[in-house]
Amino acid sequence: MGRTPLQPPRSVFASSSATGRSRTWTMRRSRRSWGAPPRSPPLRPQPRPGPSSAPMRASRAERFTHAAAAVPSWFSVTSRSRTRLRGIAKLASNSAAGDERILLDISLETTGVRVRETVPGTRFPARCPERHVEDDGWFCLGLSSGWMVEDAASASTWWAALEDFLKLQRVAARSGLWPDQNALSHGAAGKHHRDALALAGDVGLLDAYERHVSGERSVVAALDAALTKDGSRLIYGRAACPCGRSRRGRPVLRRRCPHRAKVLALLREERSRARKLQEYWTWMAGTTCCGTMKGCPLAA
């Protein structure tokens, strides 16, 4: 699990478990409230797709076959079967000790294509949420990363994410920190974090949102304080919109900004992320801390 990634070279690691979200609007709002966008006309019924109109998803066995066929040059296979690859990952190093060699098992599990140390706990902690190592030593490469491999191209992306993960482990071992820009929140909070990042980018608040998540002061905290309890609108609708949009040289008001729906969605996702993250750490209470990461909640 992780605050936790998967678009190399900068991956974002997260737990594979996540819950969906509802975008159903249930409250009626006046034109002056900054809330849901105007209702759209109902869509015409669309014909159901025929049997050949949707692409087939790869089976578990096909996913593993694609992964096994895309082995990169930095990974040397020592043994293989229909459901398991065992080998050595070689990472270049500037130290006098030479290149790092990490023994890994890549196998076909019920959760897809998974990877861990051949003997969990040898080089990395056997379990550490802050280093994105899950139960039984499985590496968390991203949201539902076990199902990421669909074809040859996505298999190569999966291997690139694994290489990035191993390099970030080296950073974490030396500094006791996992780079924030390469992490999503743990557990079910990861999906909300990912969606909030996308929304923040759409409305020009990405930098402010990332600062907020890392614990720094930003406009996002002020907006959250102005969000109604049900998340339907922001109070102070005559204040300037935080997206920075202007019209005729004057800031656009919150209640008139065309970005208002996305800003509201961002704030709701952030509230969900924070709540799910707190639930995750409550669930993890009592887990032994490995002691390798600074500020780990499990160390308290």
Image (spheres, rainbow, N blue to C red):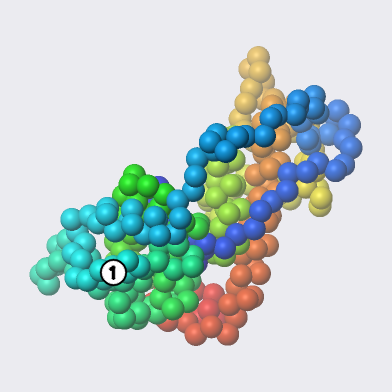
**In the rendering, at what x and y percent does residue 278 appear?**
64, 68
Q: Quadrant for the C terminus, please.
A: bottom right
The answer to whether residue 36 of the structure is visible from this angle is: yes
Residue found 55% across the figure and 42% down from its top: 198
In screen coordinates, is 106 left or right of 191? left
**In the rendering, at what x and y percent does residue 10 appear?**
37, 49
Snapshot quadrant of residue 128: bottom left
Q: Which amino acid does label 1 sit on?
A: Ser
Residue found 52% across the figure and 63% down from its top: 15
Task: Give the residue at mark 1.
Answer: 81
Q: Which of 253 and 108 is in front in this view?
A: 108
Q: Which residue lies furthest to the front in this view?
A: 51
Residue found 33% across the figure and 47% down from its top: 152
Snapshot quadrant of residue 96: bottom left
In screen coordinates, is 251 left or right of 233? left
Q: Nearer the viewer, residue 267 or 119?
A: 119
Q: Which of 296 and 70 is in front in this view?
A: 70
Residue found 46% across the figure and 72% down from its top: 134
Q: Residue furthest top?
A: 248
Number of numbered discs visible in the structure rendering: 1
**In the rendering, at what x and y percent does residue 246 appear?**
64, 22
